[in-house]
Amino acid sequence: MSKLYNVSASPHIRSGATTSTIMRDVAIALMPACALGVYQFGLRALLILLVSTLTCAATEYIYLRLMNRQQGPYECSAIVTGMLIGMNMPPTVPLWIPIVGSIFAILVVKQVFGGLGQNFMNPALGARCFLFLCYAERMNTFAIPQKVGNAIINYGAASVDGISGATPLAALKAGETISLFDAFFGFTGGVIGETSAAMILLGAAYMVYRKVISLRIPLAYLLTFSVFVLLLGGHGFDFYFLACQLCTGGLMLGAFFMATDYATSPATAVGQIVYGIGCGALTVVFRYFGLFPEGVTYAILLMNACVWVIDRHTAPRRFGVKKGGAQV
């Protein structure tokens, strides 16, 4: 314990964690979902993931060189952003779409505002929203895996190019019944990295074990979402329907990997709970009262924009300062 204390300016207690190690752990945590996406949709999915990741890394490197900004040890944040962008792509999209999204994420969402830690919204979600607005038809064309029972068969570029259909979330909104088993383990159609709640939870467990994230935001998010679904979902206290809602769409990926982004989430414990509650409530509002069946992207982005207000009103008061800032 004594090694944690340093005779220096605050903070006086420090850990060995760095931005590089944190981002490396996040990238490792994303691997299970990426691997299943590649298994589901074939080499096309792998190519999209590689293209988005390499484009993000190259864009950041070129920008920093052109701006003559000092480059310290590589902190891997661009790699995480690229992985998340690729995971949010349908495997049917042409390769130029993840390239455009990756450039937008790094240049417009991240670097224009000052780089890592200065951006007010999650770069991957900002890119996804931008691509949805610009290329709605391509971003909403989803591949449906071929399967026999619960076993996946015949994956590859040919099957991805030739099979499309509604995602489980769209089916739920249309009043249809889906298989919870398929939704949980990822035997469904959708984007590359968010079809399997099991793989996402596996990665989230790794991040919790490595103390990269706390569970305040994800639990507040998912619990609030669950309460609102039971109250407003139109199915009463149907827990099977609730479980299907939790396991479909981008909810798990958003709750554990995007809403918990350090730069765009509150710094205080109370603020993180308020932030998670807002994300959960807005997700239900967008899913049930919006045009599209998904609402995670817009819910988190709107709460990203409110973080400064949340931090301002949940920050602990300094000793000797009354509420409102007056000195005692």
Image (cartoon, rainbow, N blue to C red):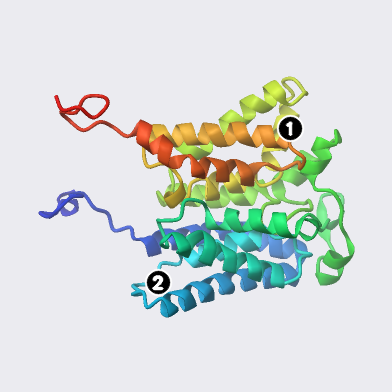
Q: Which marked residue is nearer to the observer: mark 2 or mark 1?
A: 1
Badge 2 density bin: few <14, some 14–19, many ≥20, Cα 10 Å = few
Rendered residue at 53%/63% (across/down) = 108
Determine whether 124 is above or below 275 in the image: below
Label 1, secondary structure: give it. helix
Determine whether 299 is above or below 223 in the image: below
Q: Earlier in the sequence, mark 2 or mark 1?
A: 2
Asked if residue 84 lies left or right of residue 237, the reply is: left
Q: Amino acid at mark 2?
A: Tyr
Figure label count? 2
Q: Which residue is at the front of the view, 271 or 104? A: 104
Provide residue 123's location: percent of width, then percent of height: 54, 57
Provide residue 233's location: percent of width, then percent of height: 73, 26
Label 2, secondary structure: give it. loop
Determine whether 266 is above or below 262 in the image: above
Q: Which mark is residue 289?
A: 1
Q: What is the C-alpha distance between the residues marked 2 and 1?
A: 43 Å
Rendered residue at 70%/34% (across/down) = 243
Q: Amino acid at mark 1?
A: Phe
Q: Which mark is residue 74?
A: 2
